[in-house]
Image: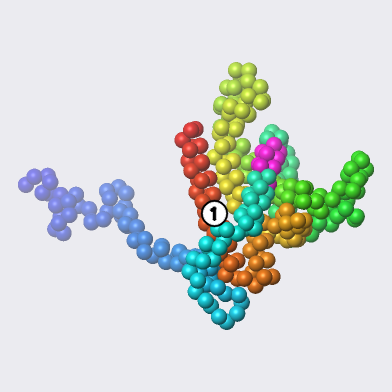
Amino acid sequence: MTATELLVTTDGTRGGHRPGVVPGKGPAPRRAASGGGATLYLVPMIVLLGLTSVVPIVYSLSLSLFNWNWGSRFDFVGLENYAALLGDGEFWASLLRTALFTVLAVAFEIVLGLAIAMAVQSMTRGLGWLRTIFILPLMVSGMVVALVWKVMLDPTLGVIPFLLGKIGLSGVDLLGSATTALPALAGIDTWWQTGFVFIILSAGLAGLPKEPFEASHVDGANALQRFRFLTLPMMVPILLTVAAIRTVDCLKVFALAFGTTNGGPAQSTDFTQMLAYRTAFREFKMSESMTMMITYTLLIVVVLAVVGLVRKAGRRAL
């Protein structure tokens, strides 16, 4: 009888070990359960997302195919509302104003947030308190921010026109002029949301590798050169991510304009959300309002797709 045959036990196992037991390691680990059980945990989240997102979108889409003005009668018109919207100059003008506000606000916030993050990058004490101070405006709702700044910018009672008057700029009404109202709202949004940009970019700067900066310092590169050729290229993915988040948020601007200028003066701050609100609840044209929102949502999706392509191109370039 060979040695192998001697190791065969009466239950048919080799080496005198029981099935499922690894020599010297105890029982073999059991195979992981199928993913069906884990999927059940996602069902509540899927249902919640469906009720809060998919259902309203489908309902809005269905209303856009009818002519409903808050009455009991629904007249099916198909794509007539969309065809009429294509020739609606007021809608496209509101899109242009919204895009201009978004570009100004996002540019201000990213430049200012990056500058602050760079300035405090070398801080070793007090950075936590500084981040807390910058995050405080984010805890305030948009309507409260709008009302506070409306009082502060009031040409009669506001503290900012009072201070401007002390330096010879008396009679300034930033929210009352069609030229300055939109940039003023972009500035308010910058004050409100720069803290978010600063926190994200500050974390991104802290995660950059130190070796390239140490090598550039040895080679004699100055601060501007290190920023231009090291910091900025490595921060591009994070900057694009922040830009995408803030772009989507700014495209949904409503509370700031509603609480400060109410779309004025001379419709200079009449953004798309404002126009849709007025169409639905003041002109009682709900179907036309839903058509605007569906079209606007599709345009935002296109913007996100473009930003995603730019991010991928930036990663490949790096």
Return the x and y of residue 220 as percentages of the image width and height. 63, 18
Indicate left or right for 299 with 38 as reference: right
- Residue type at mark 1: give it: Leu
Indicate left or right for 116 with 236 as reference: right
* Span highlighted in magenta in the image: 105-117
Question: Residue placed farthest to the top in the image?
Answer: 219
Q: Residue at x 52, y 62 (%)?
A: 83
Q: Residue at x 32, y 57 (%)?
A: 31
In the picture shown, does residue 75 fall above or below 132?
A: below
Looking at the rendered structure, the number of numbered marks drawn on it comes to 1
In the picture shown, does residue 72 fall above or below 161?
A: below
Indicate left or right for 203 with 3 as reference: right
Where disc 1 sits, the SS reads helix
Return the x and y of residue 291 as percentages of the image width and height. 56, 64
Question: Residue placed farthest to the bottom in the image?
Answer: 72
Residue 157 in view (yes/no): yes
Q: Considering depth in this image, is 32 or 315 the residue closer to the camera? A: 315
Return the x and y of residue 160 as percentages of the image width and height. 86, 48
Q: Residue at x 34, y 57 (%)?
A: 32
Question: Residue placed farthest to the left in the image?
Answer: 1
Q: Considering depth in this image, is 255 or 283 the residue closer to the camera? A: 283
Return the x and y of residue 58 as percentages of the image width and height. 50, 68
Is 219 part of what is drawn in magenta?
Answer: no
Q: Residue at x 71, y 35 (%)?
A: 119
Q: Callout 1 environment at 10 Å: few (<14), some (14 to 19), or many (20+)?
A: few
Q: Which residue is tagged 1?
A: 299
In the picture shown, does residue 219 fall above or below 237?
A: above
